[in-house]
Image (spheres, rainbow, N blue to C red):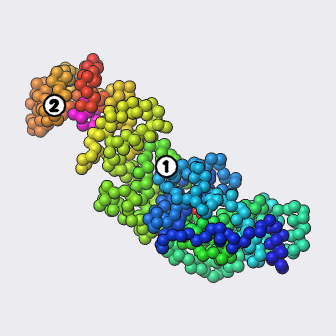
Amino acid sequence: MDYSKLADMLFPDVSMTPEDMEKRYPERNLPEGAKVTRIAPSPTGFFHFGGLFPATVAERLAHQSGGVFYLRIEDTDSKREVEGAAEFITKILGYYGLNFDEGVTADGDKGDYGPYTQSQRVDIYHVYAKQLVRDGRAYPVFSTDEELDELKALDKKAEIKSVDWENEAQARREAMLKRREFTMEQVEAELAAGHRFALFAAADGDPEKKIKITDLVKGTLEIPENDEDVVLLKSDGIPTYHFAHAIDDHLMRTTHVIRGEEWLPSLPKHVMLFRYLGFRLPKYMHIAQLMRLDENGNKKKLSKRDMGANLDDYRRMGYSVDAVNEYVMTLLNSNYEEWRMQNPDKSRLEFPFSIKKMSASGCLFDIEKLNDVSKNVISKMTAAQVYDGVTEFAKTEDPDFYETLRADRAYAESILSIGRGGAKPRKDFALWADVKPYMSFFYDKYFTRQDEMPAGKDAADIKSALEKFVETYDENDDQTAWFEKCKDIAEQIGYARETKLYKKEPEKYKGHVGDVAAFIRVAVTGRQNSPDLYEVIKILGKSKTTERIAGQIKLL
Ligand code: GLU
């Protein structure tokens, strides 16, 4: 058959050649060892939390090596597409600090290797489609997409090793070979009738033979050669993932393809296509999917419907960007936590990320661990950083609290400073959402008396202790002087000055100084637990403290 003629018949409008493409997208001029990586999400309006793992690996490898990290939008499956999804993806990834050097941005494409959205690259795919026809590697099939879907379903069925597997595989093979048989006249007639065609690559592999390929995480894999014809273009001319992957990653000069493990079974197809196209194979890293434990303790994929699967939920729930990123790093590199202990104050970006320290099996998602990591991360922040984080969160999630915080930044920061900065900072917050319940009693509009006075204490004693406290309170007292006064009060109402005195001879006292502090705490904060009482009262100020105590006395 005259393949050149066939190519011209199928793609009469394509005049460019692969050489033209090579000129348009030359090798990148980067230092030796610089890696070019990308993420290539489909714009479905949903970004899986697990997607942050390959994205982080890609970002780290590129930026650590002085390379390029870019975003490509894979919108070839228009059925799954959601409007505005590309903007959503750039926004959410930007929110997590995954900054792209190139690719789709909210303000259009950035970089010399675009367009970066696949639907805008159809002309490019057709150049290579035409070349493969010319090379006798690809052939048209004049079927509707529905018919093709049926074929696909048949292929799927054959993959599941049913009893009839041998027969089905044989039937499939025969159907495939039949598809490859056609005459030029038939093609001419189909085209003249205005029928559309899908384009297939004719597989030349022998599944009995294995090819060796190195996955940088999984090691050397032996995979069977591909013997299945691959759909390159659907009948609307739009490429499949396989075809677009080979062309885009070649022309955009990707050095490392980092993607989900679900693509591993397609690798034989990709290896074949790269060979047909005359492209050098990139390095591959297939990242295992994020797992969770089910009710019975078995590992399961964290699926789209599972709680915690939607990356955007973490922002809404109030996790800080730093905590999520820190957690991801902890799971990605086995020596990260050790490094963090030795370098508590360094940015995670200073950690020498290494492919060798990645685990080949799936990471296990554990919300308790995330919360722990998060508490540590927030405990190391300054009060100003916490203020900024919680304010940003409240802006969309709790507008009333947002206004409250904004009304007096200094006041809020002084509250957030309690117990911060020392060798053992408080670890009260895993979430920005934890901040409001923690500090709400500092604001009259949120203040409620949620806890009772300690049980079994005499109301008259409580009242007397509170009155004495108001009488003697002096804003200029330091913590020691302040506590001395509490001890004096304890003594005056028949309580022990020291807890240990009480413990020694409990029959001698009605209680101890700790109880006195508890009376004051409940009266002032409405709770049995609060941050350091001396600091709390200092921040609240004398008049508000007095007012709160008066309110409490009325209730006794
Ligand atoms: N569009 C593919 C996906 O969303 C990308 C896979 C890849 O990174 O090559 O799964």
Q: Are marks 2 and 1 in contact (CB under 8 Å)?
A: no
Above or below, comparing residue 96 to residue 201 in the picture: above
| Horizontal and vertical percent position of residue 484 | 12, 32
Location of residue 436 (image quadrant) = top left
Q: Residues within 10 Å of mark 2 (few under 14, many from 20)?
A: some
Numbered range of the magenta stretch: 528-537
Q: Which residue is drawn at 36% across and 65% down?
A: 335
Q: Name the residue under label 2.
A: 477
Ligand 1 falls in quadrant = bottom right
Q: Which of marks 2 and 1 is nearer the N terminus?
A: 1
Q: Which amino acid does label 1 sit on?
A: Tyr
Q: Is mark 2 on a helix, strand or loop?
A: loop
Q: How far apart are marks 2 and 1 (CA)?
A: 45 Å
Q: Is residue 302 magenta?
A: no
Q: What element carries label 1?
A: helix
Q: Name the residue under label 1.
A: 95
